[in-house]
Image: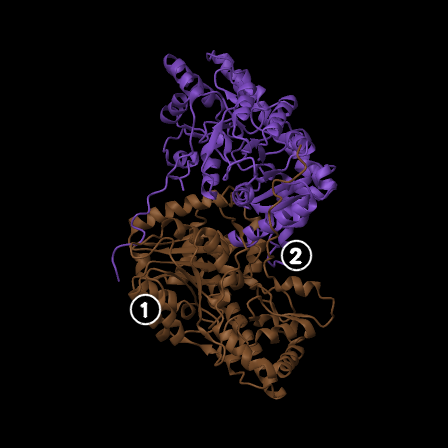
Chain colours: A brown, B purple
């Protein structure tokens, strides 16, 4: 037997940039992780709505559940209710039978199946195949790799965030869409952290219609931005109402506190029922080859909540409580920075909403926090607001203050750099 | 907004050939499904070992479990115990730290991640890239598609089953391996339904070593062939002992009665620890993009069973009981056919072991059963022995008898055809 490996040339892949790893490895007793993937309570526990906890206890006792493989496309009650949550029960696409949901292994599973599907079948005459993919700069590293492995080669980032004004740069965003190659696939985050207004979304839709851009929505935490599920779905509903064909990846992890259960849904909206049936058949095939059929537990919990008026009400109240807590943390952090006299305006902390937030820290300031203060942010420099709690708030605010004060001399040049930055997804990350 | 769909040209994919669908659609009260994917009890319920049922009730009550995302590669206690189950606790590959397991979404997830990995990284100098893939004829349709979508183009079937003698055709199998292009990837099923002897596996390994063929094992129901977990893993352990690098996809669905929980494990055995670490990093990346991290429930149950001597003992006893039931059904079916005077020898029914079985029916006989007797087999013409029970045994035996007697005049020509058949995976099935 040969002693050399046939895999001798396999390179070491860059590990997924998980802030928790650096945090765990840090021996300092002061360390703080502001980069949790999910939502935490003030006691640093995973936030799980009480109704979900209750159902998780009931399901194993239910003798009517049969434990066989689920169908490839998942639990129909779940995919239907999940889709209605996003595009609305009274959506024309639903009434016309030209929209469906496909249960996936988490939001990532929905992105993967969607990207693979588009690579195989999205070949409109007015664009080169494979099409150009546009991804918001902060998400380029994560999402770009998925599209790259699915077979797309022209993957670009777009900006909607002005790092100087610390607000949405709608003008710049519209200009980038205007200049995108016809037929490009545009990845849209809604509700997203920076909060486009309905009017701004209308402008985005108008440009996208004109340029035949294909919308792929990512709804990772519906309800957690405004506290209102319908309001947070405004953008995707507007696109559906305007007659767009689209894909939409839904994740339910944060909304239901179900992370390790891996529940996602890929929504397809197309022009008519015949096309939908053919698309469904292809998605079913893809799933059959990738994971055969989805897991049941999380989808069962969510289906039960969404289809029972009483449970739905209870869950919405829990969600609202979490959103209020998030806003309170935002206010407290802003107030602390004001009292400390931290240079700059911190209004954007409360002007934004949702779990993840651009606090407006520059790369050198993020590095300062990690190296000198043992504070770790999300890989894309955002903070998970739920990771701030009564115990660490003071320390976090003081540390941000120090990071800002210490790095003031270098700010101007770094700002220029960060506003002209043009990411490419890292090539080695297959 | 344009009224034509950009997905106008998406064709209808052939639905995965699920015998249950045809069975469900059949209104006949006599109908029998012999094509269940999993194991059933005599009462037509999903077989779940009592120890698994118990743990499924305990897990939601456990306050120490944290519900965060699992690591990309899964629960370490599970992947380690699962790997030890297959290659043995005292395997040199384990002692040398050059083998690992990676938790996947079911056996299919392990096949998919493995096929994708090989397509990216299996490029030995002595074979063209992408390499030829050899798959046993009865599994070509299912597995061929996975490799095809992963990017392999030269996918061939091999035969190890003599449809005339109704036994393993070792000579023919070895000859096919002998003639395979150097460096081909060979998909091996062990324990498989037809049961190669250790001596025959040794011959297979010798030819594969000589021709630099790469083994990709599929262990779908360890313990359910012989009732002995170690005996059923003999083949893969022999290959590891001989110094092969290999992949091995494990499914735990049938062994633990956990279907909708989707638990699989991809075992990697390579030459040294450094290579293993690099391979692991690539697999981690792939998983991060496909489903981000695996689900926890099923893997937790299995890890608890496999790492507790008391639970392990209990589970092994349950497994043994199931195997005894399978052998009893095989004996009863053979005896019924003998009493009916069904032409042909039916010794192979008891000579084989395991859940799925070639009963030796020709395509026309399988069609006869579906059309005239409302009896549905697995898509690859095998029978799931556990689907035969006290209620349907008589009817199944009489129907097989009728199918044989009715089709006798055509047998000779069909046999010739089926032994010279050379499948290709259906091209439209992406």
Residue behind mark 1: A207
Q: Is residue A378 above or below residue B73?
A: below
From mark 1 to mark 2, how far is it between C-alphas? 48 Å
Q: Nearer the viewer, mark 1 or mark 2?
A: 1
Q: Is residue B355 visible?
A: yes
Percent across and percent down for residue A64 are: 51, 45
Residue A204, horizontal then vertical, whole percent: 35, 70
Q: Is residue B293 left or right of residue A88?
A: right
Image position, residue B203 (x, y; %): 62, 23
Q: Nearer the viewer, residue A208 or B193?
A: A208
Rendered view: B10 above or below A305: above
* Vertical arrangement, residue A141 with respect to residue B86, above or below: below
Q: Quadrant of residue A326?
A: bottom right
- Residue position for label 2: B65
Count of marks placed on residues = 2
Seen at 33% across and 44% down, the residue is B11
Residue closer to the observer: B232 or B93 = B93
């Amino acid at each position: 037997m040969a002693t050399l490996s046939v895999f001798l040339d396999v390179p070491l892949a860059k590990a997924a940039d998980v802030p928790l790893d650096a945090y765990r490895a840090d021996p300092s007793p002061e360390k703080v992780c502001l980069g949790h993937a999910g939502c935490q309570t003030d006691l640093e526990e995973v936030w799980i709505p009480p109704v979900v906890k209750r159902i998780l206890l009931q399901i194993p006792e239910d003798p009517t559940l049969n434990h066989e493989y689920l169908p490839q496309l998942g639990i129909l009650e779940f995919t239907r209710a999940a889709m209605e949550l996003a595009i609305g029960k009274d959506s024309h696409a639903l009434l016309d039978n030209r929209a469906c949901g496909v249960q996936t292994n988490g939001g990532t599973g929905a992105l993967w199946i969607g990207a693979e599907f588009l690579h195989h079948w999205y070949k409109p005459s007015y664009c080169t195949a494979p099409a150009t993919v546009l991804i918001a700069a902060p998400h380029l590293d994560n999402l770009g790799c998925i599209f790259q492995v699915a077979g797309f080669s022209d993957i670009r980032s777009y900006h909607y965030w002005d790092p100087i004004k610390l607000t949405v740069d709608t003008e710049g965003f519209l200009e980038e869409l205007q200049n995108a190659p016809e037929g490009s696939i545009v990845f849209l985050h809604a509700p997203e952290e920076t909060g486009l207004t309905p009017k701004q979304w209308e402008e985005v839709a108008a440009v996208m219609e004109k340029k035949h851009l294909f919308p792929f929505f990512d709804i990772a935490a519906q309800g957690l931005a405004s506290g209102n599920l319908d309001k947070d779905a405004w953008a995707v509903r507007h696109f559906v109402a305007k007659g767009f064909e689209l894909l939409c990846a839904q994740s339910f992890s944060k909304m239901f506190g179900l992370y390790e259960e891996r529940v996602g849904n890929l929504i397809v909206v197309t022009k008519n029922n015949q096309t939908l049936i053919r698309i469904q058949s292809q998605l079913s095939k893809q799933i059959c080859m990738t994971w055969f059929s989805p897991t049941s537990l999380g989808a069962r919990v969510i289906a039960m909540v969404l289809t029972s008026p009483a449970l739905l009400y209870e869950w919405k109240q829990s969600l609202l409580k979490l959103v209020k807590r998030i806003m309170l943390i935002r206010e407290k952090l802003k107030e602390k920075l004001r009292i400390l006299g931290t240079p700059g305006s911190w209004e954007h902390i409360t002007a934004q909403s949702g779990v993840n937030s651009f606090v407006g820290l520059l790369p050198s300031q993020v590095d300062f926090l990690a190296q000198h203060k043992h504070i770790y942010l999300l890989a894309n420099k955002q903070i998970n607001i739920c990771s701030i709690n009564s115990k660490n708030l003071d320390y976090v605010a003081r540390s941000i203050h120090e990071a800002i004060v210490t790095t003031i001399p270098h700010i101007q040049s770094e700002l220029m750099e960060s506003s002209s930055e043009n990411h490419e997804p890292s090539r080695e990350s297959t």
